[in-house]
Image (cartoon, grey):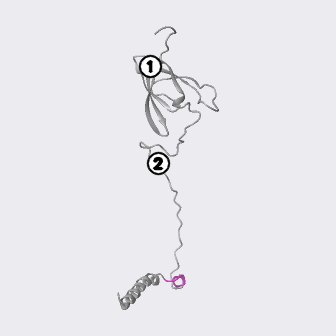
Amino acid sequence: MTRMNRLALVVGLLAVMRAPLAAQGTPADSAAGGAPAAPTEMVFDREVFEYPSFDRRSPFRSLVGDTDSGPRFEQVRLRGIIWSADPARSVALFSGAPAQGAGAGAPLGTRRLRRGEEWGNMRVVEIQQDRVVVDVNEFGLTERRVLELTRRRAEGGL
C-alpha cells in the first residue's frame, strides 16, 4: 500500500468515527436548544430463579443429608423377614449400628419397614422370602442393592 492510500484510509476512518459523535451533541446543546429533557424512569425487576425438577438432583439440597434421618446403608443389617404372599403385608426387620471408629455411639435400634418405606439413605423396593431389594441414594445417585437373610446354623448341626 502506498503512502497516499494509507492516508486516504485513515482520513476515511476518522470521518466515519466522527459522524456518530457529532450527532450526539452536548448536554448544553439539548438544554439550551428548546425542549426540556424527559425525566428518567427507573424500573426495578426482581430476578426469579426456578430450578427444573426433572431427573436431576436439586443443587439446594444437602449432599450429606439430615443427620436425624437415620443410618447410612453400610450401618444397616437385615435381621429378619416376616413374609406374606401379599407383598403389601410383608415386613423386613433392620437394625442399625453406629459407624466404626472414633465417636461410635449407641446402637440405632431396630426398624420394621414395608415396601416403599425409607430409613436413612435406603428405600425398600421389594421383600422376598430370603432377601430384600433396596434402593440406596448416595449423593443424588440411586443404586439398587440386595440384602440376603443369613440363617444361623444350630451348634453341632449341618
Q: In the displayed structure, would residue 39 be above or below residue 13? A: above
Q: Quadrant of residue 133?
A: top left
User: Which residue is at the front of the view, 70 or 31?
Assistant: 70
Q: In the displayed structure, would residue 95 be above or below residue 35? A: above
Q: Name the residue beneath numbered marker 2.
A: 51
User: Which residue is at the front of the view, 139 or 50?
Assistant: 139
- Where is residue 131 drawn, in percent x and y? 43, 22
> What residue appears at the point 48 percent right and 44 percent down from the top-left corner?
58
- Where is residue 76 drawn, in percent x and y? 53, 26
Q: Amino acid at mark 1?
A: Arg
- Where is residue 49 drawn, in percent x and y? 49, 52
Tell me which segment is drawn in magenta.
25-31
Residue 68: in magenta span: no
Real-space Cα separation, disc 2 to disc 1, in angstroms: 38 Å
Q: Quadrant of residue 39?
A: bottom right
Q: Quadrant of residue 110?
A: top right
- Left or right of 9? Residue 44 is right
Q: Name the residue beneath numbered marker 1.
A: 89
Q: How many marks?
A: 2
**Quadrant (top left/top right/bottom left/bottom right) for the C terminus:** top left
User: Which residue is at the front of the view, 6 or 122?
Assistant: 6
Contact, mark 2 vs mark 1 (Cβ under 8 Å)? no
Q: Amino acid at mark 2?
A: Tyr
